[in-house]
Image (tube, rainbow, N blue to C red):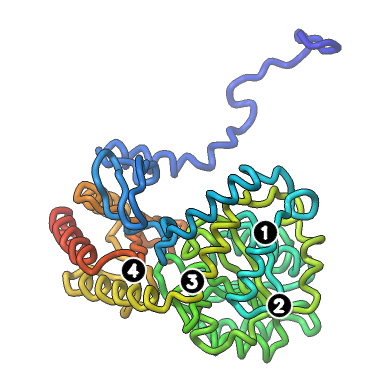
Amino acid sequence: MSEGINQSDQPVAREGDAPDLFSKFDPLIKQRADLLASGIEDPFSLVMERVLSPTQAICNGRETILLGTYNYMGMTFDPDVVESGKQALADFGSGTTGSRVLNGTYQGHRECEDALKEFYGMDHAMVFSTGYQANLGIISTIAGKGDYVVLDIDSHASIWDGCALGNAEIVPFKHNDIEAMEKRLKRIPEGAGKLVVLEGVYSMLGDIAPLKEMIAIAKRHGAMVLVDEAHSMGFIGENGRGVAEDQGVMDDVDFIIGTFSKSVGTVGGFCVSNHPKFEIMRLVCRPYVFTASLPPSVVATAATSIRKLMHNADKRAHLWENSRKLHKGLKERGFTLGTDVPQSAIVAVIMPDLERGAAMWEALLTEGLYVNLARPPATPANMTLLRCSLCAEHTSEQVDTILGMFERAGKAIGII
C-alpha cells in the first residue's frame, strides 16, 4: 500500500463508470475483424523476412517482387551509399543522443544540409528526423494563430497536423482546383498572414499539381508558398528537383519540403529555402528543437545518395519507361487507374470495394508481388486502391512479370 493513501477510502471503479477511450475505434476494429474472419491475411502486418534488393524480398518464405516501397531511385543498396553508412557508424557510433540545438549536430548533419543546398540550388537547408516532422515543424512554426493556411483537401496527414499544431486558420480547397484555391484566397482578410501549401505529386493517385498556375495566383494574393516534393524528388524535373523545377517555378517557391524515405533511400526529412531569415527556424521550430537528431550513419547515407541523385539522368529516364509501361499494360488489361496517363512513379489501381481490394492484394501476394492496399479515410473519395510505386531498378522484364500477375489475380478475383 502506498504511504498517505487509504485504499479503503477510494471509490471502487465499476464497469461503465467512465467511457472507454478506445470506443471511437470500434467501427475500424470490427471492419478489420470481419476482413480477417474471411480468411484474408492482414495487409497491414506483412513482414519482410529478408530484403534482397530494392525490388525483391522474402515475404512469407517466398521471393517477392516489391512494388510498394517508394524506393523510386533504388538507392537503398547502392554500394557507395551503404559504405558511407558503415564508415560513419564506425567513426561516430550508433546515435547522437541529443537534439540538433544541443549535442545532436555532427559533421554529417552539416554535410547532408550542404548536399541539399547544392541539389536544390538554395541558400538554406534544415534536416529533420522524419519527413512528417519537417511538415509538422515548418508549417506550425511559420503559420500560427491569426494566420491562414490554404491547402489542397487531399494534402498529406503531416500537412494537416502541422496546421493544427500551429493553430492557424485552415482553409482547404477542392483537389487541384485552381479556381477554388483563388476563391479561398480572396476571402482571407486584408493584411493577414497567408501560406499556400501544395504537393508536387499526391501520393494516393500519383497525380501532379498545376503548380505554375497555383503559385502565380498565390503570389498575386501576397501568400507565401510551401511545396512538398516528397514523391517527386529524384526523378521529376531536369535535375530531379521535383515538379516545381519541371514547371519552371522553383524561384517562386518559398519553402520546399522533402523526405529521405523515398528516392534518397533512408529516413529523415528536410526543408530548403532562400528566405533570408530562415536560419532562425533552428531556434523556434519545436519539432526540430525537441527531437533527437538522426544517427550519423543515416545522414551519411543520405548525403551520399543526394549527391549521386544529381547525376542520375539515365535512372530517371528508365523509371519513366517503367511507369509508362506499367500504366499502359494495366489499362489495356481492363483495370481502372487513378490517372488517365502516367504522371509519376505511382500507379494507383482502383478497386470496387475494400473486401475485393483486400482479396486482390492477397492474390497478388500469392503470385509473388507486394503492393500497398490503401483504404479510406487515407484515400480520396472513399476509394480503395492498390498503390504501385515503381523503382528505377525494376527491369523491363520484371514489369512484364508484374503485368502477368495482375492479369491472373484480377481474373481470379473478378476485378477484370
Q: Which residue is mark 4?
A: 347
Q: Which residue is mark 3?
A: 309
Quarter the N terminus occupies: top right
- Considering only order in the chain, which callout, 2 or 1, is on the residue closer to the N terminus? 1
Quarter the C terminus occupies: bottom left
Task: Determine whether the residue tagged by mark 3 lies in a helix, strand or loop.
Answer: helix
Mark-to-mark CA distance, 2 and 3:
19 Å
Mark-to-mark CA distance, 1 and 4:
34 Å
The residue that appears at 69% across and 46% down in the rendered structure is 96
Residue 36 occupies quadrant: top left
Front residue of this view, candidates 119 and 176: 119
* One can see residue 176 in this view: no
The reply, left or right, for residue 2 in relation to residue 131 is right
Please identify, in this view, whether the residue under mark 1 or under mark 2 is nearer the observer: 1
Please report contact status of discs 4 and 2: CB closer than 8 Å, yes or no: no
Name the kind of residue labelled 4 in the image.
Answer: Val
Residue 170 occupies quadrant: bottom right
Q: Which mark is residue 123?
A: 2
Position of residue 166 measured from the top left corner of the image (x, y, whole percent): 73, 62
Name the kind of residue labelled 3 in the image.
Answer: Leu
Please say if 346 is above or below 411: below
Task: Determine whether the residue tagged by mark 1 lies in a helix, strand or loop.
Answer: helix
Q: Which residue is mark 1?
A: 109
Please identify, in this view, whether the residue under mark 4 or under mark 2 is nearer the observer: 2
Please say if 315 is above or below 412: below
Position of residue 3 measured from the top left corner of the image (x, y, whole percent): 83, 10
